[in-house]
Image (tube, coloured by chain):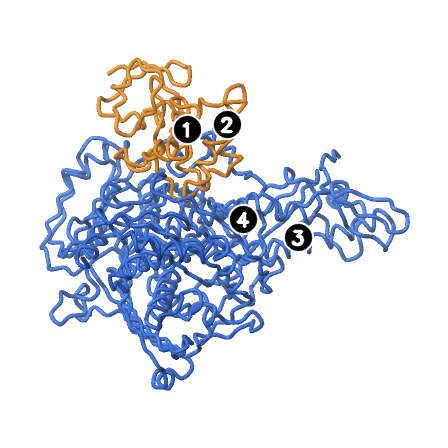
Chain colours: A orange, B blue
Amino acid sequence: MNITVKINGKSYSHEVEPRLLLIHYIREVVGLTGSHVGCETSLCGACTVELNGKAIKSCTMFAVQANGASIVTIEGLATDGRLHPMQEAFWNEHGLQCGFCTPGMIMASKQILDHNAAPTEEEIRHGLEGNVCRCTGYQHIVNAVKTAAAGAGK
Amino acid sequence: MATTTMTQTETLVGKRVRRREDPRLITGTATYVEDIQMPGMHYAVIVRSPHAAAKIRSINTKQAGAAPGVMAVFTGKDTAKVGPVPCGASLPGLRVPHHHILATDRVYYVGHPVAVVIATDRYLARDAADLVEVDYEVLPAVSDPEKAQAKGAPAVHPEWPDNIAFNFHQEGGEVDKAFAGADVVVKQRITSQRLIPMAMETRGVVAEWHGADRQLNLYTSTQVPHLVRTLVAMMLGLEENRMRVITPEVGGGFGSKLNIYAEEALMGFVAMKINKPVKWIESRRENFMCTIHGRGHVDFYEVAAKRDGTIVGIKLKIIQDLGAYHQLLTPLIPTLSVLMMPGVYRTRNVRADIVGVFTNCMPTDAYRGAGRPEATHGIERMVDILAAELKMDPADIRLKNFIGKDEFPYQTGTGLMYDSGDYAAPLKKALDKVGYVKLRLEQADARKQGKWMGIGISTYGEICAIGPSPATPAGGWESATVKIDPSGKVTVMTGACPHGQGEETTFAQIAADELGVGIDDVLVIRGDTAIVQYGIGTFGSRATAVGGAALYYALQDLKAKIKKFGAMLLESEDVTFTGGQVVCNRTGKSKPVAEIAAASYRALKLPPGTEPGLFATRFWEPPNFTFPFGAHIVVSEIDGETGEIKIRRYVAVDDCGNMINPLLVEGQVHGGVAQGLGQALWEQVVYDDNGQLVTGELMDYAVPRAHMMPWIETDHTTTPSPVNPLGVKGVGEAGTIGCSPAVVNSVVDALSPLGVRHIDMPLTPEKIWKLMAGGK
């Protein structure tokens, strides 16, 4: 099947097998390897990308289902060489260690603030439920989302 | 020559410097094994046994071999000459089963690799793997280490029908006398369940063979690249210098990548056979089945004490569930529990027996803490049980039994020499921080109102900076190289191969301070055996305490050389090296490091007896382990209707010696606590009686998520270690080790009015609810 998708503002057109997973399309066909495969069952969130403005798990969606969609991956967050405030906040607050969950975690965190500019700690934790981090114990990630929210509110 | 090096006046060690590895990680531009693509790359999918014990009658690979895109299928017959997966541990009388990289005539656990299918595309390889027909004769299996010792239990390895791999005994002091003279002896069976390390990045290997050069490049997600090189080269019969191991970004290890795995050798074998690069990426399901598990203890404790609470002796019997094979360190892990069994307490009368038992399960091995969480959980639970028996406050009984701060170095009954400590300090700090006295009053009130509130203390000690070479199976030293280029830029190469811990930052802090240069002028390189000198690796909270110390000494050598060149250039013997400059003490004239570096390579003139260039390597052998410690306090509330546990406060006061970067220390404590809490409350590997892995997916295995974690209040005391020049002790595992007993002690304390004395982990609501229902 031929699909056309916009990823990080750039249009891509490819002939793909109907069974090709979106994450494999993004990583291996388009060559954007920032989004990761952590579980293949939509339980860990390492593959989280933004599709038509909504954070989704790209490991349990077929590429053909994304035909015509507009996708943002971790690679698309920084603009003109400047980090997205959420990336900056993860860096400043030590919100990552091994970094494997980080792209998905940043995309999920961005989504939280897209819906709620000033989330409480509980709302942040709830918003991150679908993303597993095995390194940080989440506390510095929560701090990162809080600081990003505070920064955006200024 | 350009001299752009900035000199540094403000010191960086001890500061909360944000990490230098982060820009690539937060932008999605880091390279993990799965991100590697090569021309002509093929994909491997491994066919694994669905049975825990079975004979292989036959394997038919014809259909799979003829499937679209398939280049080759290999079975155990093809790989029989590849050396066995190595066990690095040697214990007297240890039975070591031959561990083929692919099963030959029999499988021993669910997930046992049986065949490998190689295709041009990962989807096609998976399709073809389903076409491999294996005819199994299913045999009875045993998955429980206690049942495995019963008469008539199925033999995991037919040659050893008792399923016992080894017995180990150690004792110190006068145990029988101590127990005979004791006023009270408390006994308890305590388990430390099997756990899945669950690094976010599963294992993965890319192998690339250059036949004409006899050169194998192996990209693998490991904590120990040099050990992989030595041992996998040996398995493949390849000269070690023809093998290069590259460890790109590693997405977490926690001990699970401190190993040599069948798949690493298998991919090397495949690449050499097909003459094409080959990639294997472990699925999450495989990761749960076929990457080592942790813990797996059944412990029987006896603690003898005087009526005033003085502990006079400890006896411990450990049943260690080994699984079907020994991985790299499998049998050694429970011996670390024995070393650590007295914890932070004074008694030297200790006796321990381990029986290592084979089961039809994935091997256990080092998982964050490796033997020390089990020991700490045991002794910290026993101290609480003793306190309850003697009606003493759990804080008081600990303070009574601590080794005093003036007793260090302290020789333990298990043969360790604790380096330094002040065990009362973190406990007192934690008690103050949590408001202990007030909390006890609140608890008394809560009980009157029928509420379940508990306060749990754990005061842990641990063994870090693994360790002096005679105490380790592969050398306990670590290496570091520092070189300064002609332009004055500094490169550090560490053999420790950190992977997420942040040494690209902390080692740069150390080097920048010592050399007086800006941190941006320092680059830390790790994880490529063709670039970095031989090293041991990152595990056992050793990277900074051993690897950082090696770096410190290499920096001293380099500074001495810089000083010599500086003296030559300044034409003065009376010089000082400070702030990135060699300064003449008489004239005040100075030469910056960059200019000295340029001169050292240009070599128009050399100081007497001095070689050109600025380069220093040190292999540092530590004289001892280090022994961090601390106190964790947990305040819990239990829902009487559901048995659900709420952690109201979590206070962690850790002493890891000097801190290079407190921000990163906090991160290590948080992450460690999360894994300890995972064990205490949620995580548990379940094999059914047939050896089927019931918890084979994230759906069935509960790792902590953001909403499950309490806020962790961290604090520190600082007792420098005398073992290394940095005074650091290590902190990678502290959180995990300190956590689980504090949680269980808290919940047992909450339920103590019901007469509850002990609960085994994980403390699931169901378990707690049943206890409460039974007590009503």
- Counting from the top left corner in percent of width and height, residue B4 is at 72, 34
Residue A4: x percent and y percent?
A: 31, 13
Q: Is residue B221 visible?
A: yes
Q: Earlier in the sequence, mark 2 or mark 1?
A: 1
Residue indicated by mark 1? A119
Task: Kindly identify which chain the residue marked by label 3 belongs to.
Answer: B
Instruction: Using residue B418 as the reference point, say whether residue B697 is left or right of it.
Output: left
Residues at marks 2 and 1, common chain? yes
Rendered image quadrant of residue A134: top left
Marks 2 and 1, how far apart in space? 10 Å
Of B720 and A46, nearer the camera is B720
The x and y percentages for residue B679 are 32, 53
The alpha-carbon separation of the residues under discs 3 and 4 comes to 16 Å
Q: How many angstroms separate mark 2 from mark 4 (CA)? A: 43 Å
Question: Left or right: where does residue B621 sit relative to residue B157?
Answer: right
Q: Which mark is residue A150?
A: 2
Task: Mark 2: give few (<14), some (14-19) or many (20+) Cα within 10 Å.
Answer: few
Check disc 4 and give the amino acid type.
Val
Q: Which three-letter amino acid code belongs to the residue tagged 1?
A: Pro
Front residue of this view, candidates B509 and B345: B345
